[in-house]
Amino acid sequence: MRRSGPLRLCAVRWGWTIAACGYLGGCGADPGVVVIGGGPAGLAAAIEAAATGQVVDLYEARATLGGSALYGDAVTAIPSDAALERLDTLGGTPNAARTRFVKQVKPDVVDWLGAMGQRWRETPNLVESDVQLVAPVGKGESVVTFLIQAAKTAGVHLHTDTRVTGLERTPDGITVHTEPGGDAHASAVVIATGGYAGNLDRVRERLGLDASVPLLRGATSFADGNGIDLGVKAGGVERLPGQVMLYAHGVPDPNNHDAAVMFVDGDRGYALDTTGAAFNDIRSPRGDSGAALLARPGSVAWVIVDQRAIQELQLWSVELRAMVSAKTVAKEVGVHAGDVETMAKRLHVPTEAVQAGRPAPGARADALHPLGDGHLYALPLRLTTAKSLTGLQIDLDGRLLDARGTVIPRLYAAGEAAGFAHPWEAVHIDSTMVSGAILTGRAAGKATAEWRVGTEP
Ligand SMILES: Cc1cc2nc3c(=O)[nH]c(=O)nc-3n(C[C@H](O)[C@H](O)[C@H](O)COP(=O)(O)OP(=O)(O)OC[C@H]3O[C@@H](n4cnc5c(N)ncnc54)[C@H](O)[C@@H]3O)c2cc1C
């Protein structure tokens, strides 16, 4: 891959060794592949592109590789054939090619990582019995560790602290502007920069929410959508831009008012809104609790927990993935009361509404639980951005498409940057998950070989 910067250096094939051989064709090497973003999608794309014998440079803006996967559990859904059919239908027109692609989650993600050493454990799926859930031992961080190792073994040049700021198409390739580092010339570029759910301004704009609707950031701040903009500037299209998944199971982080502390688990506690009505959507089977909160503009929903639930709840602050003590959160941002009557007064709801939590008649077992006696805490639930479901439109090989659906030569996208706009539009198996990121990343990485010098279409 050729680089030209103020020093006119080029780094070719020797990884971190920079050869000062000038830019006037002195290096004489094939321009290689550039991957933008070092999350699971980018790493998977880089591994596959390198496997085709190409020189691959991966640029990651942060000091650390791994992207958002470092902060999550990377729980992965393996749909049965029946689930695939159901999900496919949900997404609109059934599409055999898409279904075949999604079927690859087991062999191409779970088994692929398994061959690298990743161990998986089954995790119960209380919602859809025909979708098997597995979680990597060591969570997302472990998956990232295996991917980085595989990328190094494949000879990928990993550049951290380097942000891609622009793409320019040239007759024989793509010029990639990086900071710092100057320009690089590539035969093909994979945009794997993640989604935009960490960019509240963009979420507000896309959803048409004004500043009066309280919104918390439940995604990493670097998921800001800048890579989607790069793709759009290069001729790509952002499909269905108003699709953002909002959860309600976030409470304000007492240490970072811009971000949420997310509920991870905890099976005791129940929720009600400011009228005292049960707010059944918290951690609901269909999960769209954000929409429920949005449907009651200006309202606050509370989750009420007792001392024991406080211990059972796992809460983490989105970016640090640090466990935040539930007690700290309750003390800092919640309402505390020694008994039901006091709690009801403090929340301005009828006593029966609070009492309903012990237990509520007809309550669903997975959502409402009897509270114990003693101290109660009410935590204010807020609309929390979880992930953007849309992104750059691509085909099943990760090729970027323009507004007419025509392939844009040399440009690819994968992972959350391609988002729900990926040709399958099915819940749970989209590219806005670690598994989808890896699947789409691998596809795009392999496809870049079509621009290898001597084999261009
Ligand atoms: C708290 C949390 C929990 C989650 N839990 C799960 C879960 O249980 N299961 C699951 O499947 N998924 C989960 N996810 C989602 C999952 O982590 C993401 O879907 C996945 O990481 C997306 O991968 P990606 O490679 O597309 O993007 P990212 O992981 O976001 O990586 C994108 C990378 O690109 C870099 N970048 C951006 N712009 C540039 C630029 N211009 N130049 C260079 N680099 C750039 C970013 O710094 C980042 O490192 C969770 C996410 C979060 C935040």
Image: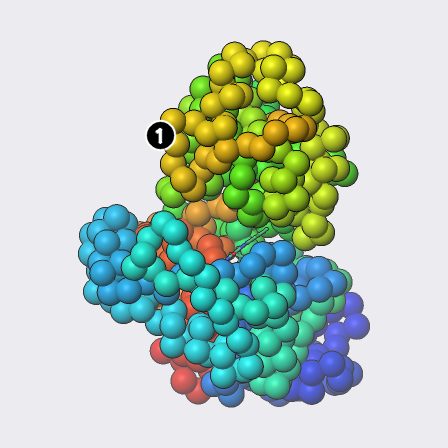
Q: State the image coordinates of residue 175 (x, y, percent, origin top left).
A: 59, 66
Please name whichever residue, 239 or 415, is drawn nearer the observer in this view of the structure: 415
Q: What residue appears at the point 62 percent right and 33 percent down from the top-left corner?
A: 306
Q: State the image coordinates of residue 30 (x, y, percent, origin top left).
A: 56, 84
Image quarter of residue 325: top right
Q: What residue appears at the point 65 percent right and 86 percent down from the top-left corner?
A: 13
Badge 1 marks a residue whose secondary structure is: loop
Q: Circle 1 is placed at which residue position?
A: 362
Quadrant hosting ligand 1? bottom right
Quarter the C terminus occupies: bottom left
Q: Can residue 224 be seen in this view?
A: no
Please name whichever residue, 96 or 337, is drawn nearer the observer in this view of the structure: 337
Please name whichever residue, 108 or 171, is drawn nearer the observer in this view of the structure: 108
Q: State the image coordinates of residue 183 (x, y, percent, origin top left).
A: 67, 67
Quarter the N terminus occupies: bottom right
Measured along the vertical axis of the image, is residue 22 above or below residue 247?
Answer: below
Image quarter of residue 98: bottom left
Q: Can residue 371 be seen in this view?
A: yes
Mark 1 residue type? Gly
